[in-house]
Image (cartoon, rainbow, N blue to C red):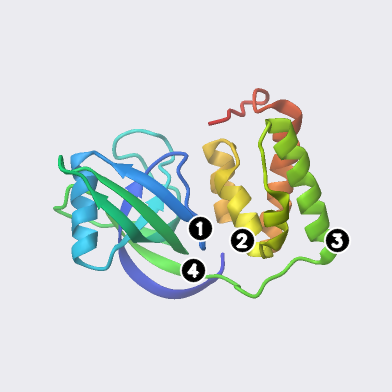
Amino acid sequence: MGSVVETTRISIFPLSGALLFPGLQLPLHIFEPRYRAMISDSLARDRLIGMIQPVRPSEGAKLFEIGCLGRIEEVEALEDGRYNIILDGLSRFRVLRELDVTTPFRQVEAQLLEEDEDAVLLPVERASLEQEARRFADHQGYAVDWEQVTRLDDIALINGVSQVAPFDPASKQALLEADGLNARCDLLVQLMQFYGRHDGDEDGATLQ
């Protein structure tokens, strides 16, 4: 999965269904004491935290292998200690091991994964993706500014739809783990076709 460029220590926010992709933003409301402590720590150091899904939504659950490192770009500190933040997605990472720490929040040793920022789709692939996205949006009843969509580059379009589409957590995780633009595009089209047919209520699929 991508080229390894760096090994680093990452404070993580395990949250099922809330994925961050490189180049995109994720708004979060931070209210649990341990994650308020994590944000305070991050703001005092490098403003970085890692978003990652637990395999099961339970306390101390095993983590999926791949997450995304984000930088806190905007922060609103509320009077009662809560935070509203916006994360900018920087890079996917692969968890090597979870660290034994005294902080209330979990930390991992991870490898940052290099992305091919110059990757592009063939014109026929781009046209097929946009066509499927239109069908999916119409089926879901979404109002979309398609003129604005056509201005997005291929990476922004694929990652953007992957992050916001109402797929189940496992499907979104598969999109995040897909290595390379074409692999993610192919999987995204398959998921839009599946959810467009089944409304997410068959074969064990559920919408968030």
Q: Residues within 10 Å of mark 3 (few under 14, many from 20)?
A: few
Amino acid type indicated by mark 4 = Leu
Say which residue label 4 marks. 113
Which mark is on residue 124? 3
Say which residue label 1 marks. 24
Rendered view: 192 above or below 93: above
Query: At which x and y percent is residue 164?
Result: 56, 44
Tag 3 secondary structure: helix
Q: Residues within 10 Å of mark 4 (few under 14, many from 20)?
A: many
Q: Are marks 2 and 3 in contact (CB under 8 Å)?
A: no
Q: Is residue 11 left or right of residue 114?
A: left
Disc 2 and disc 3: Cα gap in Å?
17 Å
Disc 4 and disc 2: Cα gap in Å?
18 Å
Q: Are marks 4 and 2 in contact (CB under 8 Å)?
A: no
Amino acid type indicated by mark 2 = Ala
Q: Tell me which label, 4 or 1, sits earlier in the chain.
A: 1
Say which residue label 2 marks. 156
Q: Tell me which label, 1 or 3, sits earlier in the chain.
A: 1
Q: Nearer the viewer, residue 65 or 130?
A: 130
Place residue 8 in its image quadrant: bottom left
Query: At which x and y percent is residue 118?
Result: 65, 75
Q: Nearer the viewer, residue 6 or 138?
A: 138
